Amino acid sequence: MPRVLLIEDDPSIREGVALGLRRRGHEVAAAETGEAGLALMTGFSPELVLLDLMLPGMNGVQVCRRIRETSQLPIIMLTARGDDFDIVVGLEAGADDYIVKPARTEVIEARIKAVLRRLGAPAGSRPDIEFHGELAIDRAGLTVAKNGERVPLAPSEIKLLLHLSASPEQVFSRQQLLECVWDHSYHADARLVDACVRRLRTKVEDVDGSPRYIQTVRGFGYRFGPL
């Protein structure tokens, strides 16, 4: 089971979540501040971070940005607030998903599995490495390069790109993408999709041009290409 770093300042939530995950076989390291959580990163080497959005001192958004400076480690935000602005800022900072507290351990475990699940290559004769304009997409290695230079992508970003590029020109609604990329089978928050698209565009698109790869089909959703 994956090692989980839990950064949560509420002791009851921190202890409850950590206990629930340990009972399911996870190795868990817990910290009550962002600074303490970052200090645990090197020695503990987590495979996923559960990150409270509202932390004393360095808040969750700042911690998320700090992690993203050097790592594409999966990050799930924990938030007790329904504040739209805070959630959007957290997603824009690089979080892969979020969970509103309080949440049962079963829900947290399901989200962890969904974020960590590797997408298998689509069936058929599709090559492992595809070339789309300046992009080289390695489906087997789950890596992307632009003009020969590796592009660091978070798990949700690579999953979204793999899904869209597997069917060029096909339009996917936000709900379809939530179901296929995030494994959310209910009417979840479409902001997950929009924030991920914006982050992905900053990494794979040309700065001064209109989107070439991840295109918006107004009123419907998103598509890949055509190029």
Image (tube, rainbow, N blue to C red):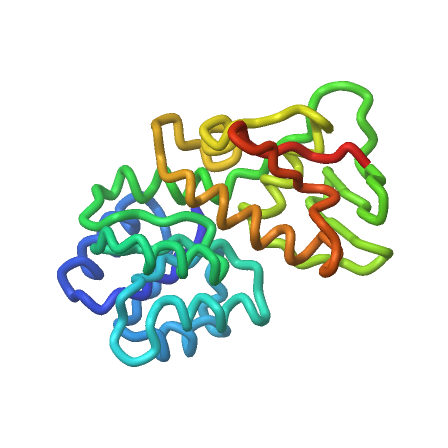
| Residue 94 at x, y percent in the picture | 50, 59
Q: Nearer the viewer, residue 120 or 21?
A: 120
Compare residues 227 and 156 and report the one nearer the observer: 227
Q: Position of residue 66 (x, y in %)?
A: 49, 73
Name the residue located 65 percent from the left edge and 41 percent from the top edge: 161
Residue 75, quarter of the rendered image? bottom left
Q: Is residue 74 left or right of residue 58?
A: right
User: Residue placed at 82% from the left, 40% from the top?
Assistant: 132
Q: Is residue 7 above or below residue 136?
A: below
Q: Is residue 217 above or below residue 34?
A: above
The residue sitting at 49% across, 65% down in the picture is 45
| Outermost residue, top side | 124
Quadrant assignment for the C terminus? top right
Residue 25 x, y percent position in the rendering: 35, 46
Instruction: Look at 77% across and 32% down and name the residue there.
Output: 226
In the rendered structure, the answer to whether residue 223 lies left or right of residue 77 reads right
- The percent coordinates of residue 194 (x first, y second) are 50, 45
